[in-house]
Image (cartoon, rainbow, N blue to C red):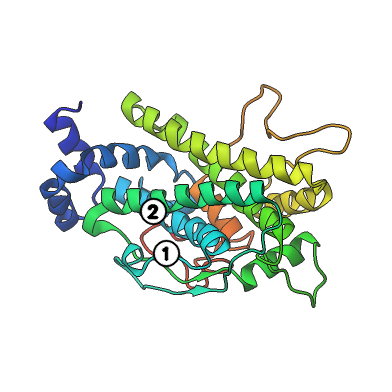
């Protein structure tokens, strides 16, 4: 499907350094299409905090991998009662463990089925990016699935200053926690679209964005069905307070009117740059290199929030 020169060019753009580039070239026959799809994520970094020069595709792919580690761990614990296999967490940088996480006490069979499908998707994303990056892949950094959610819930006013929030305590808490992630993923991938000129890359990015949008739609719909509009609105406002001066984030509506698809007046979803995504996962509106869900920061080059 792709000419050798095209694949070679894509691989060269996806390596973080010369040694990794040579490894990519040697494994082109294996990684091939994976590199095509993963390279399409190259638009994730648009904020000024990402450095004066444009980051390499490999650096951006590793940024995406850091985020996929977080989502995969969150959903895997909720559905399977454990996190990623050790073999899916190794790589460059500081290897970290996972704080918290356990199986949800599911009450609704359909919600468990939805969560299981999403969990499989997120684990597949980790496998996909790791295969595409080859020896350039970063290790899973330390991830906090316990204290971070409490901090986020306190910021949103869902719990008091001395109370805790357990995302695995029940289905409602799980869905609210999932909402925090899924909407961010959609806006991050959507931010890549205008930065991709190659139509092949753009098509692959659209496929990844579609999966994240499906996930977000599932989560938002179930939250609405459970009449959790007020809690969602509080989380949305908290996210908006972290990612800059814009007021783009949206809840799921009210009892009179649903807002399951957050769009502007033209029916278009908004975008987030990588540094603004980091503001949310670090749980800070300022510039930082760690915090929140990543106590020691991300692995790789793109680690600074806006």
Disc 1 to disc 2, C-alpha distance: 9 Å
Residue lying farthest right?
256
Q: Position of residue 119 (x, y in %)?
A: 50, 52
* Disc number for residue 272: none
Residue 125 position (above or below residue 90): above
Q: Is residue 66 visible?
A: yes
Left or right of residue 181: residue 65: left
- In this view, the residue farthest toward the top is 266
Query: Left or right: where does residue 12 sit relative to residue 82?
Result: left
Query: Splitting the image into 4 quarters, where does residue 10 fall?
Result: top left
In contact (CB < 8 Å): disc 1 and disc 2: yes
The residue most toward the front is: 109
Left or right, residue 218 beside residue 86: right
Which residue was labeled with disc 2? 126
Reply above or below: 86 against 224: below
Where residue 113 sits: x, y (%)?
58, 48
Q: Quadrant of the C terminus?
A: bottom right
- Disc 1 target residue: 84
């Amino acid at each position: 499907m792709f000419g050798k020169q095209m694949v070679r060019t894509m691989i060269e753009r996806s390596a973080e350094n010369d040694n990794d580039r040579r490894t990519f070239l040697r494994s082109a026959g294996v990684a091939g299409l994976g590199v095509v799809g993963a390279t399409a994520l190259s638009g994730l970094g648009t904020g000024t905090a990402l450095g004066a020069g444009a980051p390499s595709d490999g650096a951006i792919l590793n940024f995406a991998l850091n985020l996929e580690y977080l989502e995969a761990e969150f959903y895997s614990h909720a559905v399977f009662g454990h996190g990623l296999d050790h073999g899916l967490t190794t790589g460059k940088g500081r290897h970290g463990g996972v704080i918290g996480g356990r199986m949800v006490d599911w009450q609704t069979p359909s919600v468990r089925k939805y969560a299981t499908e999403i969990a499989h998707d997120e684990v597949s994303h980790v496998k996909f990016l790791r295969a595409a990056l080859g020896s350039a892949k970063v290790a899973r950094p330390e991830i906090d699935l316990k204290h971070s959610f409490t901090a986020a819930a306190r910021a949103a006013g869902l719990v008091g200053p001395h109370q805790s929030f357990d995302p695995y305590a029940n289905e409602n808490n799980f869905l609210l926690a999932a909402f925090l992630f899924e909407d961010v993923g959609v806006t991050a991938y959507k931010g890549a679209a205008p930065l991709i000129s190659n139509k092949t890359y753009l098509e692959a990015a659209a496929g990844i964005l579609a999966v994240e949008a499906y996930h977000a739609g599932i989560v938002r719909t179930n939250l609405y069905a459970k009449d959790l509009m007020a809690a969602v609105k509080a989380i949305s406002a908290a996210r908006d307070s972290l990612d800059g001066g814009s007021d783009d984030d949206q809840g799921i509506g009210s009892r009179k009117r649903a807002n399951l698809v957050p769009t502007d007046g033209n029916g278009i979803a908004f975008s987030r740059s990588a540094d603004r995504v980091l503001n949310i996962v670090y749980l800070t509106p300022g510039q930082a290199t760690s915090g929140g869900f990543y106590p020691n920061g991300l692995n790789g080059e793109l680690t600074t929030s806006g």
